């Protein structure tokens, strides 16, 4: 596996793991059923992406980082629930950009490219869906 691709895949892996931890923290305090549904779905997507990235790294002969990114701590420290949710969406945007960077490094054909393309599309959707839901939910939560 190309070392630059391995490095960015591990960065994405660490970021997805951090997303799971960040969402777990939010779920511990959120009671609104719509917001819980949004967060639960996002958490499941983050966990699935982490698993897929681990498999991709192993299949390509790369080393799998055991680390969790520092994003979860940033979310936990970000003031109000609205602030933490906004930061979560910002994190999705960051990951979407990093997935695009990884796509540029991946071979144009093959399983890695296909996985990254699916991941990029999911993150694009989550960013837009998350923004819309955040606006709606913040209006109802006050």
Image (tube, helix red, strand yellow):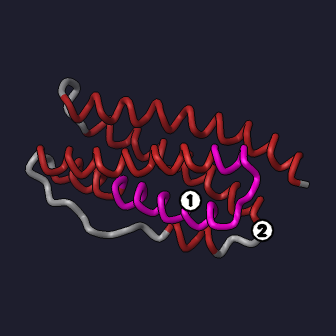
Q: Nearer the viewer, residue 130 or 35?
A: 35
Q: Which residue is identified by label 2? A: 80
Q: Which mark is residue 93?
A: none
Is 113 rendered above or below residue 69? above
Residue 105 magenta-highlighted: no
Residue 53 point in image, percent of width and height: 28, 48
Spot the residue most to the right: 142
Spot the residue most to the left: 61
What secondary structure prevails in the magenta region?
A: helix
Residue 15 magenta-highlighted: yes
Sequence order check, earlier mark of 2 and 1: 1
Q: Which residue is identified by label 1? A: 23
Is 45 rendered above or below residue 63? above
Q: Nearer the viewer, residue 111 or 107?
A: 111
Q: Nearer the viewer, residue 30 or 109?
A: 30
Residue 63 point in image, percent of width and height: 15, 60
Q: Tell whether 126 sits left or right of 17.
A: right
Spot the residue most to the top: 109
Q: Nearer the viewer, mark 2 or mark 1?
A: 1
Is 66 rendered above or below residue 109? below
Indicate the quadrant containing the C terminus: top left, top right, bottom left or bottom right: bottom right
Residue 9 point in image, percent of width and height: 29, 51
The number of callouts visible is: 2
Badge 2 density bin: few <14, some 14–19, many ≥20, Cα 10 Å:
few
Q: Tell whether 121 sits left or right of 8.
A: right
Residue at the image point whose x is 28% and y is 44% from the top: 52
Disc 2, SS: loop
Query: What span is in magenta?
Result: 12-37
Badge 1 density bin: few <14, some 14–19, many ≥20, Cα 10 Å:
many
Residue at the image point whose x is 50% and y is 51% from the top: 43
């Amino acid at each position: 596996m190309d070392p630059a691709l391995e490095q960015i895949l591990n960065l994405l892996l660490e970021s997805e793991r951090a997303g799971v931890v960040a969402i777990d923290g939010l779920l511990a305090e959120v009671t609104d059923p719509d917001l819980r549904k949004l967060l639960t779905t996002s958490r499941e997507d983050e966990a699935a992406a982490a698993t897929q990235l681990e498999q991709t790294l192993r299949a390509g002969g790369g080393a799998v980082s055991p680390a969790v990114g520092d994003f979860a701590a940033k979310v936990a420290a970000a003031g109000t629930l609205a602030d933490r949710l906004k930061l979560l969406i910002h994190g999705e945007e960051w990951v979407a950009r990093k997935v695009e960077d990884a796509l540029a490094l991946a071979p144009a054909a093959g399983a890695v490219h296909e996985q990254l393309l699916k991941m990029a599309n999911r993150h694009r959707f989550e960013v837009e869906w998350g923004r819309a839901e955040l606006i709606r939910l913040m209006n109802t939560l006050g």
